[in-house]
Image: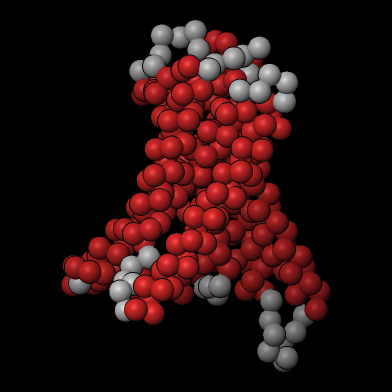
Amino acid sequence: MLGRLMKYEWKATWKLLVPANLLIVVTSFFSWIAWRRMRYDGYDVNAVVNLAAFVLLVTSFLSMFVVIVGSAIYLIWRFYTSTYGDQGYLLHTLPVDKHHIIIAKVLVSTAWILLSTVLMCIYMYLDYSTTLDEVGVALEEILKAVLTQWFGNTESAFYVVMGIIMMIVGMLVRVLKVTACISLGQLSSNHKLLTAFGFYYAIYVVQKIIDAIYAYFSFEWWESGGFEMMWEFGLITGLAYMVIFYVLTWYVMEKKLNLD
């Protein structure tokens, strides 16, 4: 059943998000061309070409920003309407476990966010490359360095793996925090969205307080020579947030569901 739910979620989102992500690819290409045309050597300056290239560069950057922000807003709207909106009546009448509903929506949303993040990184990298040959050489050097560190240094390989895990955990935390806040907003009878925003802000403040406390003590440990790795805090708190936000989402969906 989980596979069917994920398949349905993909079908419901790809018609908008695939073209949106393709827009990032297209704008990256034109932005790369614009970057190549802009010259600052003082000898071969074409003001019209440079102005057009600059406008295209800025436009492509803004397009990328709009796509990423718009995709995030769409995924939030999609979760709200399909779970607690009019579509929610049909969803919750299906013989489907609430855990499957949450996992399917969170995994699909995280996958879209991961795709947009990867495309954004490629976009930013291409903008600082002058030729395709340079891009290829740089990617080859990066791959060689990663493989060398991976197979030649166990400690470096560990940090690479933990970095990837932390990135994925961070995305899952952000998605689950939104689902938890939207779910908690359903506890209000009149102002569900406003309540959801209130919970989001309250959780944000609590997280910042926890980060500040950790930053204080980590500085003390650093001064005493006992502080070694900050990634432990990020991973532990990330996993804790995942569990908390997931349980909150499930609890409201299972015990306090109110679609009125």
Residue at image coords 34%, 79%: 224
| Place of residue 256 in the rendered image (x, y in percent of width and height, measured from the top left) | 53, 17
Q: Residue 78: which quarter of the image? A: top right
Residue 81 position (above or below residue 118):
above
Q: Is residue 119 left or right of residue 240?
A: right
Model colouring: secondary structure
Residue at position x 75%, y 84% from top? 45
Q: Is residue 22 visible?
A: no
Residue in front for this viewpoint, 230 or 11: 230
Instruction: Kindly indicate the quadrant of the structure image that contains residue 191.
Output: top right
Answer above or below: position of 31 versus 235.
below
Question: In this figure, what is the number of numbered marks?
Answer: 0
The image quadrant that residue 192 belongs to is: top right
| Viewer-proximal residue among 91 and 149 | 91
Look at 26% across and 69% down and name the residue there: 156
Quadrant where the C terminus sits is: top right
Q: Position of residue 72 (x, y in %)?
A: 60, 42
Find the residue positioned furthest to the bottom. 43
Residue closer to the observer: 40 or 185: 185
Q: Quadrant of the N terminus?
A: top left
